[in-house]
Amino acid sequence: MKKEWKFTFRILIKKEDDLWMAHCLELDLVTESLSLDEVERDIVAIIKRQVSYCIANDNMENLFRSAPKEVWDEFNACKEKRKPRNQEFIARKRPIPVSFVTNNCFSNPTACHA
């Protein structure tokens, strides 16, 4: 049994109208919020819940579900990438350490500085 899990997740963040959107590309998870800080916190929390659920249910083969190609293309074309951030937590039900790195990118840099 694996004693520790390590991942890297890419997250595309953009502002559309009044909402910030964060999309985790490896898991195809999306969240929206009125603030940048909140959308960043929310996507990390959702990633933690998804990873914890798969570990607790011994279902890691279903963890990854890739975002559509156009989202990957938008991320890859993105010019404003943030410094990767490390995240760590202990998975629920099975006390397994999990660490992951988030690589965030803003698809519309002008929205970030408004």
Image (spheres, rainbow, N blue to C red):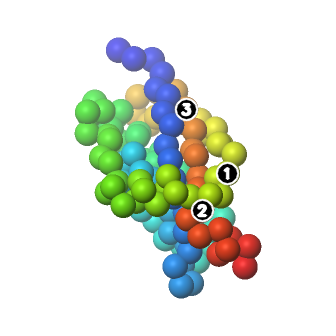
Identify the residue under disc 3.
99
The answer to whether the residue labelled 3 contacts the one labelled 2, judged by CB atoms less than 8 Å apart, is no
Q: Is residue 90 visible?
A: no
Residue shown at the point (56%, 74%) measured from the top left:
15
State the residue in front, 17 or 62: 17
Label at residue 107: none
Name the amino acid, label 2.
Answer: Phe
Q: In this view, does 59 lie to the left or right of 52?
A: left
Extreme residue toward the right, this view: 113
The answer to whether the residue labelled 1 contacts the one labelled 2, judged by CB atoms less than 8 Å apart, is yes
Question: Judging from the image, what secondary structure is the residue with disc 1 in?
Answer: loop
Residue shown at the point (49%, 43%) measured from the top left:
9
Structural crowding at the residue carrying mark 3, measured as other residues with C-alpha within 10 Å and reported as few (<14), some (14–19) or many (≥20): some
Residue shown at the point (32%, 40%) measured from the top left:
63
Q: Is residue 33 positioned above or below 99 on the image?
A: below
Q: Can residue 74 be seen in this view?
A: yes
How far apart are the two marked residues, 1 and 2, measured between alpha carbons?
8 Å
Identify the residue under disc 1.
82
Structural crowding at the residue carrying mark 1, measured as other residues with C-alpha within 10 Å and reported as few (<14), some (14–19) or many (≥20): few
Identify the residue under disc 2.
106
